[in-house]
Amino acid sequence: QTRDFPNAALVYRKATELQPDQITHRRGLAQTLLSEEKFSEALEQFQTLSQMDADDPDNYLRMAQIYKQMQQLDKAEQNVLLAKQRAPGSLEVIYYESSIYEAEGRFDDSIRVLSDAVAGVKSQSEFTPSRRRTLAILYQQLGQLYRETDNYSAAVNTFEEMLRLGPEEDRRARAMIIDTYREGRDISKALEASRKAVD
């Protein structure tokens, strides 16, 4: 907690040596090594964890994260799909799957993953605060992705969906709509959106 990762790693290593079958010690070591950006060592620990507990999606998700950092995108994709099998609705898994496709230049696949996730969340009958937060995150990611691929009208439409979620989302979405018009060199609409935001 004091972010003294080298000493934390030492203690976790010792604990792992004393109790090699204790998953919590090894997970602590793996997370600490990841925080230190010692990717190869962290990967080794998460691989062991995935053998000890094959059903835990977090092990595969962390391996996907590490492989992405190491620019081994094919392995990152394999592991994020293994995480998805074990936690199909997880927002973090969706985020990493989308970001890996984006890193691979597969923007259509990245957009599909986020669009499917939005449709899944919208189909839930109960509108809870956590559902609203999840939708806001997904809309923001999806809108930014549309913007990166120069699909400015789709980005604006997505941010307009986001602003209907609540006052906080409204403020964030309006700022992103203005930025989108500006990036798309549509200054008159950017000014109009700015006036609406001020109102």
Image (cartoon, rainbow, N blue to C red):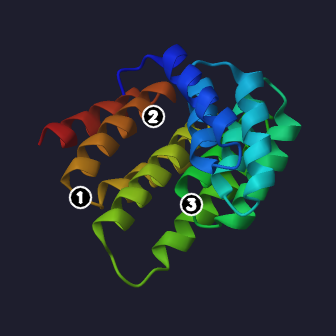
SS state under label 2: helix
**Residue nearest the observer in this picture, 3 or 185:** 3
Nearer the viewer's eye, disc 1 or disc 2?
1
**Residue nearest the observer in this picture, 186 or 182:** 182
Q: Are marks 3 and 1 in contact (CB under 8 Å)?
A: no
Q: Is residue 109 above or below residue 13?
A: below
Q: Which tag, 2 or 3, sits closer to the chain's start?
A: 3
Q: Which tag, 1 or 2, sits closer to the chain's start?
A: 1
Asked if one can make out residue 5 in the rendered structure from this viewpoint, the answer is yes
How packed is label 2: few (under 14 Cα within 10 Å), some, or many (20 or more)?
Answer: many
The residue that mark 3 highlights is: 90
SS state under label 3: loop
Residue 113 in the image: state x and y as whole percent.
67, 57
Rendering quarter of residue 28: top right
28 lies left or right of 54: left
How packed is label 3: few (under 14 Cα within 10 Å), some, or many (20 or more)?
Answer: some
Separation of marks 3 and 1 at Cα, in angstroms:
23 Å
Rendering quarter of residue 171: top left
The residue that mark 1 highlights is: 166
Type of amino acid at the residue the image marks with label 2:
Thr
SS state under label 1: loop
Q: Which tag, 3 or 1, sits closer to the chain's start?
A: 3
The residue that appears at 44% across and 50% down in the rendered structure is: 137
Separation of marks 1 and 2 at Cα, in angstroms:
20 Å
Q: Is residue 28 above or below residue 55?
A: above
Separation of marks 2 and 3 at Cα, in angstroms:
28 Å
The residue that mark 2 highlights is: 180
